Amino acid sequence: MPILVTGGAGYIGSHTCVELLNQGYEVIVLDNFANSNPEALTRVEEITGKTMKAYHVDLLDRESVKEVFEQNKIESVIHFAGLKAVGESVSVPLYYYQNNITGTVILCEVMQEYGVKNLVFSSSATVYGTPDKVPIKEDSKLGATNPYGRTKQMIEEILRDVAFSDPSWSISLLRYFNPIGAHQSGRIGEDPNGIPNNLMPYISQVAIGKRQQLQVFGNDYPTKDGTGVRDYIHVVDLAIGHLRALEKVQSIKGIEAYNLGTGIGYSVLEMVETFRKVSGRPIPYELTDRRSGDISTCYADPAKARDELNWQAMRGIEQMCKDSWRWQYHNPNGYNKAFSKQNIRNDRNPVRYAAGFFNV
């Protein structure tokens, strides 16, 4: 039966679609393309040699979401769709609460109406806020410190209430740490809008010459070189984690949270040096003051995912940087942001878009 992937044209969503198709799943994508590009879906089909159906639909459009379920016998949902920029969420919190939380509520209501109760939810390690200790376990205290993180934490609570009210639901909450890297083909990768919010795409854009230098916020943390330490995970490992979680929700009921990380922390300067080595490009950087709210060290204890999902990250930091650089080098302007209804529907585009769902 088909798997619905909301936000399937995004960075993590597109890589997950590749893994789903390669494992023989029938994939249906729902995406509003607000911070993604349909070209990613074309390339997913190119990589896999398989086709999928895609709907240009916003989760806030309940009737269009219902039509997707009406037209397809969906078995399970992997839910990526949502706004994700921490800084923007601070500036426009109501926009984030309306989009992320209301969109998820509408999705769950429609799922319930059509008897679809298997869900893998894209959560985030931001739900932990400032950790009391590392490595961080799933039972650590939650306390998101920004509106984006709070939307993830609130959605987790909503989904726990749903699962408690109806034991026939099966839900996995996947708390990502820091996804980086790209598909080894170099055809899909992270393509941020405007100035990157995350470290790796910023480093990549400095290496390719789109940015002059990297700003390193804080060099006086209690770490090996004074810069912040984070748990970076290859996006393909992360995508495979979604397949393991999908298998789990298809086999048992209830709700569980899982950390998806490597369990290893790397500093900002270690990332800069590794990227410089694999790319052969200079990465000029400037040390500046700490940002308010940043923490010194954050990395996962991924043992629960290993024990219960039979999953663990396999790709190391050099592979992550190599794959990020390959994507950036061959796609200096990402997917080319300029697209229109006409070129989405072009017959040469192999992605099978469903008629009537275009609102570009």
Image (tube, grey):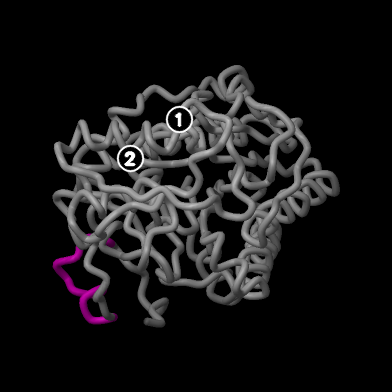
**Which is more N-terminal, label 1 or label 2?**
2
Which image quadrant is residue 16 in?
Answer: top left
Determine whether the residue tagged by mark 1 lies in a helix, strand or loop: loop
Q: Position of residue 103 (x, y in %)?
A: 62, 67
Is 27 magenta? The answer is no
Q: Position of residue 250 (x, y in %)?
A: 60, 35
Q: Is residue 332 above or below residue 224?
A: below
Determine whether the residue tagged by mark 2 lies in a helix, strand or loop: loop
Q: Provide the residue designation for mark 1.
A: 225
* Magenta stretch, residue numbers: 341-351
Circle 2 or circle 1, nearest the eye: 1
As drawn, the label of residue 140 is: none
Q: Is residue 230 visible?
A: no
Label 1 is placed on what type of residue? Asp
Label 2 is placed on what type of residue? Gly
Q: Nearer the viewer, residue 187 or 249?
A: 187
Query: Is 153 on the left or on the right of 239, as rendered?
Result: right
Prevailing secondary structure class for the magenta stretch in the rendered image: loop
Residue at 69% x, 53% y is 145
- Crowdedness near tag 1: few (<14), some (14–19) or many (≥20) residues, C-alpha within 10 Å: some
Q: Position of residue 231 (x, y in %)?
A: 50, 33
Q: Is residue 356 above or below residue 40?
A: below
Residue at 32% x, 38% y is 272
As drawn, the residue found furthest toward the top would be 307
Q: Position of residue 25 (x, y in %)?
A: 40, 41
As drawn, the label of residue 181 is: 2
Quadrant in which the C terminus appears: bottom left
Residue at 74% x, 36% y is 254
Is 347 magenta? The answer is yes
Q: Nearer the viewer, residue 58 or 267?
A: 267
